[in-house]
Image (cartoon, grey):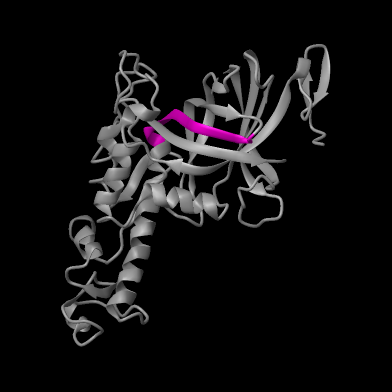
């Protein structure tokens, strides 16, 4: 039995046995889905009476990342790969009088590791070790299992660098889903929230890192699976691997002339060195160097622009600047322990 204590009325109770017949069930997300339509996982954050792309930019963001990478960045695939190998594990403890209407339910969500350090099995036997916990208030769960939380701070993991996913601080986060306590599942789950422009700017460097990794992969394929061949000019790429080779830059690698990555570099690599440099000064919230400015940049007032920057449609602090973006993702979850 879990021996963590939680406050309940006039005293404490064990998490495994809640207040007045309430129980605590632990879940872990086993699948993430980028919504096909913005309204499928959106909250009306701008209070215009409509749930649309202004409230959930994730579907368009996924498309933009795929476009800038010539199809190499598939956000849904990256997310589910990170979930499957345990790099991103989202756990939740739901305390409620399951099977009854309960407007005093509780939910604690967290990023977690597995206790054994191995990839999760998602078969109900995974033991989670929480790393960061977030308490959601105003949790309502009805007799049919439909659940909705109030707004809270949370995180959204963006695995552009699979080995070290960025954690975006989400504001106004809401969790929804249908909880089946007996089966140990959450179906039709949604996580929504908002992220500000300065927070998102921290992730742009990872896009450059990912593209740089794709360059090395493309270079290896060009050399028929061998080690990438360094080059400084196109002439260095004659008689290497396949035909039609070009050099990605003054300190680059040989790749096929018609490769997708070469097309990306053609319009993004401003200094022509074969890599995409992004340097964001978090202390002062400015880009020192940004070769992905066509994707995302900030003006002098901190207002984002670029293909992704234009998805920031929310002025949540009423300062006259649209400097926040709504995000919403769908998920499913299965039982676990902690």
Q: Residue at x 29, y 72 (%)?
A: 251
Q: Residue at x 37, y 34 (%)?
A: 197
State the image quarter where residue 10 is shown.
Answer: top right
Q: How many numbered marks have been drawn onto this rendered protein structure?
A: 0
Q: Nearest the camera: 99 or 333?
A: 99
State the image quarter where residue 91 is shown.
Answer: top right
Q: Residue furthest bottom?
A: 239
**Image position, residue 137 (x, y; %):** 60, 19
Q: Judge whether residue 144 can be spotted in this image.
A: yes
Magenta part mainly helix, strand or loop?
strand
Q: Is residue 240 one of those drawn in magenta?
A: no
State the image quarter where residue 195 is shown.
Answer: top left
Q: In screen coordinates, is 9 left or right of 227?
A: right
Residues in magenta, as a range? 183-198
Could you tell me which quadrant the N terminus lies in?
top right
Residue 189, above or below 63: above
Residue 184, above or below 218: above
**Image position, residue 22 (x, y; %):** 73, 20
**Image position, residue 42 (x, y; %):** 38, 26
Q: In screen coordinates, is 86 left or right of 1?
A: left
Q: Residue at x 33, y 23 (%)?
A: 314
Q: Nearest the camera: 273 or 222?
A: 222
Q: Is residue 190 one of those drawn in magenta?
A: yes
Could you tell me which quadrant the C terminus lies in?
top right
Q: Nearest the camera: 230 or 85?
A: 85
Q: Nearest the camera: 178 or 69?
A: 178
């Amino acid at each position: 039995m879990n021996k963590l204590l939680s406050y309940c009325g006039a005293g404490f109770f064990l998490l495994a046995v809640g207040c007045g017949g309430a129980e605590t069930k632990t879940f872990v997300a086993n699948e993430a889905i980028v919504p096909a339509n913005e309204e499928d996982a959106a909250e009306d954050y701008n209070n215009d009476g409509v749930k649309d792309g202004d409230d959930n930019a994730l579907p368009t963001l996924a498309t933009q990342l795929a476009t800038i990478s010539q199809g190499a960045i598939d956000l849904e695939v990256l997310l589910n790969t990170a979930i499957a190998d345990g790099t991103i594990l989202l756990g939740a403890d739901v305390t409620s009088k399951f099977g009854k209407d309960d407007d005093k339910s509780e939910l604690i969500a967290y990023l977690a590791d597995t206790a054994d350090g191995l990839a999760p099995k998602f078969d109900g036997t995974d033991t989670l070790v929480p790393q960061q916990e977030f308490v959601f208030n105003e949790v309502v769960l009805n007799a049919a299992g439909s659940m909705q939380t109030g707004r809270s701070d949370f995180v959204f993991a963006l695995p552009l660098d699979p080995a070290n996913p960025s954690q975006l601080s989400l504001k106004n986060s809401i969790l929804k889903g249908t909880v089946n306590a007996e089966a140990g599942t959450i179906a039709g789950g949604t996580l929504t929230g908002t992220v500000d422009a300065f927070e998102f700017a921290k992730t742009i460097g990872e896009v450059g890192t990912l593209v740089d990794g794709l360059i090395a992969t493309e270079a290896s394929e060009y050399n028929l699976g061998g080690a990438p061949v360094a080059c400084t000019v196109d002439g260095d790429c004659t008689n290497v691997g396949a035909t039609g080779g070009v050099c990605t830059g003054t300190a680059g690698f040989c790749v096929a002339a018609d490769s997708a990555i070469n097309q990306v570099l053609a319009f993004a690599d401003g200094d022509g060195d074969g890599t995409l440099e992004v340097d964001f000064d978090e202390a002062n919230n400015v880009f020192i160097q940004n070769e992905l400015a066509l994707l995302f940049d900030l003006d002098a007032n901190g207002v984002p622009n670029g293909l992704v920057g234009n998805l920031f449609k929310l002025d949540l602090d009423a300062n006259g600047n649209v400097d926040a973006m709504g995000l919403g993702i769908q998920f499913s979850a299965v039982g676990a322990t902690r």
